[in-house]
Image (spheres, rainbow, N blue to C red):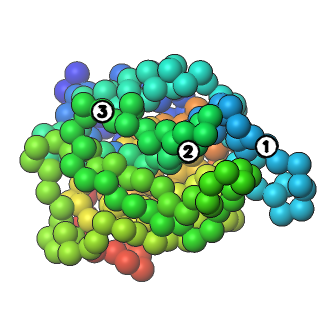
Amino acid sequence: MTKEELLPFLNQIICGDAIQEMKKLPSESIDLIVTSPPYNLKNSTGNGMKDGRGGKWANAALVNGYATYDDNMPYDKYIEWQRACLTEMLRLLSHDGAIFYNHKWRVQGGLIQDRHEIIADFPVRQIIIWKRKGGINFNPGYFLPTYEVIYLIAKPNFKLAPKANAVGDVWEFTQESKNIHPAPFPIPLIERIISSTTAKIILDPFSGSGTTAVVAKKLGRKYIGIEISQEYCDFSRKRISECQKQPLQNNLLLLNY
């Protein structure tokens, strides 16, 4: 399969399984991957996402979970699945491409899961801290988590766009709230990532509500989104159709392609 065969997939939201759909794409055809997989939050030996207090806690979107995915895999199977996803992502990356893989640490059985089992042996170049403004914590045994981790997994020739390296590695962005997806990317966060690169073709294999695709379009890049929920796919396509190609607030680099 040649890179030219990628053309039918460009600027599409594909409804399907992440690994199976990625296998249809040619090797070394993607410049940048920006994604955040389900965190397996429902698989918990503690109180997890369950809470009986009602009130504001009843409105926490992640308590209700995703549209078609229960987020409750045995831990070893979850690790195996995510490593398989990253292996496929790495195959798709061009020689100067990178993956921005957003994840979240959590406490399981009183001990932290730092996700090292997932990213071990992958070429992690940097860890970026995304400090969220807000959050919830149903467990009185530890402090409220206020940040997530973005692993920069890079091919050897990956470089940032000119002057983008002046930005620090701790980012603060407010979580998105007006969105049907329970854990959407904030637009400014994805704007920061994409505009910090010269990538022309961007993939999000866990596309959710389509924020990566929306920002890619506005920045003049090509996108591919993969999402297993038909509801989220339909919502993403609607968002994309309504957005215009234009510079965003914190844009570093706008490309025409």
Residue under the point 50% across and 48% down? 104
Amino acid type assigned to the residue bearing label 1 in the image: Lys
Amino acid type assigned to the residue bearing label 2 in the image: Arg
Residue 255 at what x, y percent from top left? 25, 65
Q: In screen coordinates, is 65 left or right of 9?
A: right
Q: Is residue 226 above or below residue 130?
A: above
Q: Earlier in the sequence, mark 2 or mark 1?
A: 1
* Residue 120 numbered tag: 3
Q: Nearer the viewer, residue 40 or 158?
A: 40
Element class at badge 3: loop
Residue 103 at what x, y percent from top left? 46, 46
Amino acid type assigned to the residue bearing label 3 in the image: Ala
Instruction: Kindly give the residue lying farthest to the bottom in the view shown.
Output: 249
Assess disc 1: are there few (<14), some (14-19) or many (≥20) residues with their C-alpha within 10 Å of its C-alpha.
Answer: some
Assess disc 2: are there few (<14), some (14-19) or many (≥20) residues with their C-alpha within 10 Å of its C-alpha.
Answer: some
**Residue 149 makes an appearance in the image:** yes
Residue under the point 41% across and 75% down? 248
Q: CA distance from mark 2 to mark 3?
A: 17 Å
* Residue 50 numbered tag: 1
Q: Earlier in the sequence, mark 2 or mark 3?
A: 2
**Residue 186 makes an appearance in the image:** no
